[in-house]
Amino acid sequence: MKLAKIIFFITFFSTALLGETGYLRYSETSFCMDSCSVYFLEAENGEFISWISYLDDMESLDYFRDRFVEIEGDTIQCVECVAINVNSIEISDSCASPVYCYVDPCVVNECNSYPNAECIPNYCDGCWADFYLNGDLVDCGSTRDCIDLSGIDFGHCDMVLGIGWVNDSCMSISGCDWTVDSVDYTSAFFYSMDACVEACDFVSIEAINHLPQTFHLYDNIPNPFNPNTIIHYDLQKNVHVQIMIYDVLGREVRLLVNHLENAGLKSVVWDATNNFGQPVSAGMYLYRISAGNFHSVKKMILLK
């Protein structure tokens, strides 16, 4: 799905077209009392710029969440506030204070959905790898972005965290916080049931078949990370599994898994510590899985 620009025409009265640049943020609480409260634009110094709305498709804005963007739109009146209704939105690299990344994000990220896409790094508030095909930004998100939240206790609070994948289905999840045992699960939540079903439908298919069809090691989520990241992998059959973390010199850093596991969809969390429980330094690391005759290695970046 191409996401270079979200463009549509407003058919109701509005003011002159406005252009703004800043970080698109998600709002957990707001006084706007409608869809205008979901997102807002924030300046680089943290100052509030405007509420942001997209009346026809609010879900599309989630792709740009926490990104530095250029927005054009019309001013609209919401229930309790004024917002910019998006006509077009683009990811921008013109931020005044880019971050330093240990390596080029394009070195450690791939676009499996569009293998011929060109990767362009972006350093605005993160180490981003943006992929373009024929000049259009493309969504390289894989179905592995669906994280199984079954068995995770988010606390007994009434705050709605979002829609998540639990016990082989999408459902609304409430709790006290998105972080559990130092792992931030924010990226595992969706803002609509349809988005969850679209991303997690592959789980339903595999549940029907009971077992993954192949062995596979996925990209860690998130990447880059600090300090926790999740490594997902598929086991086609019961097998002894070993997952080891190495530094760029090939030295062993942490043995994460070393036991017999049943076939299925698996995951393990690395908290950026070594075998002695000591925090490791920022930089590039390798993680390697050995499961019977299956072996695979991938790269990840730890930021500090």
Image (spheres, rainbow, N blue to C red):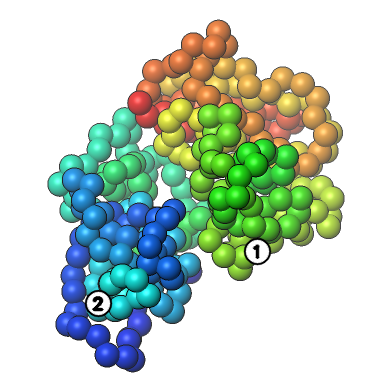
Q: Position of residue 64 (x, y in %)?
A: 38, 59
- Horizontally, residue 234 falls left or right of residue 72, namely right
Along the viewing direction, whichever of 67 and 122 lies nearer the viewer:
67
Q: What residue do we see at 80% from left, 25% from top?
A: 260
Residue 75, numbered circle = 2
Distance in Å between CA atoms under marks 2 and 1: 33 Å
* Relative vertical location of residue 70 with respect to residue 180 in this rendering, above or below: below
- Quadrant (top left/top right/bottom left/bottom right) for the C terminus: top left
Q: Position of residue 9 (x, y in %)?
A: 33, 86
* Relative vertical location of residue 104 with respect to residue 252 in this rendering, above or below: below
Q: What residue do we see at 68% from left, 58% from top?
A: 171
Residue 197, numbered circle = 1
Q: SS class of the residue under badge 1?
A: helix
Q: What residue do we see at 37% from left, 23% from top?
A: 282
Along the viewing direction, whichever of 280 and 247 lies nearer the viewer:
280
Q: Quadrant of residue 157?
A: top right
Q: SS class of the residue under badge 2?
A: strand
How many neighbours does mark 2 have within 10 angstroms: few (below 14), some (14-19), or many (20 or more)?
Answer: many
The mark lying in front, picked from 2 and 1, is 2
Contact (Cβ within 8 Å) of mark 2 with mark 1: no
Q: Quadrant of residue 183?
A: top right
How many neighbours does mark 1 have within 10 angstroms: few (below 14), some (14-19), or many (20 or more)?
Answer: many
Q: Amino acid at mark 2?
A: Thr
Q: Quadrant of residue 80?
A: bottom left
- Considering every residue shown, the one lying at the far top of the view is 276
- Horizontally, residue 110 falls left or right of residue 20, namely right
- Horizontally, residue 169 falls left or right of residue 1, namely right
Q: Amino acid at mark 1?
A: Val
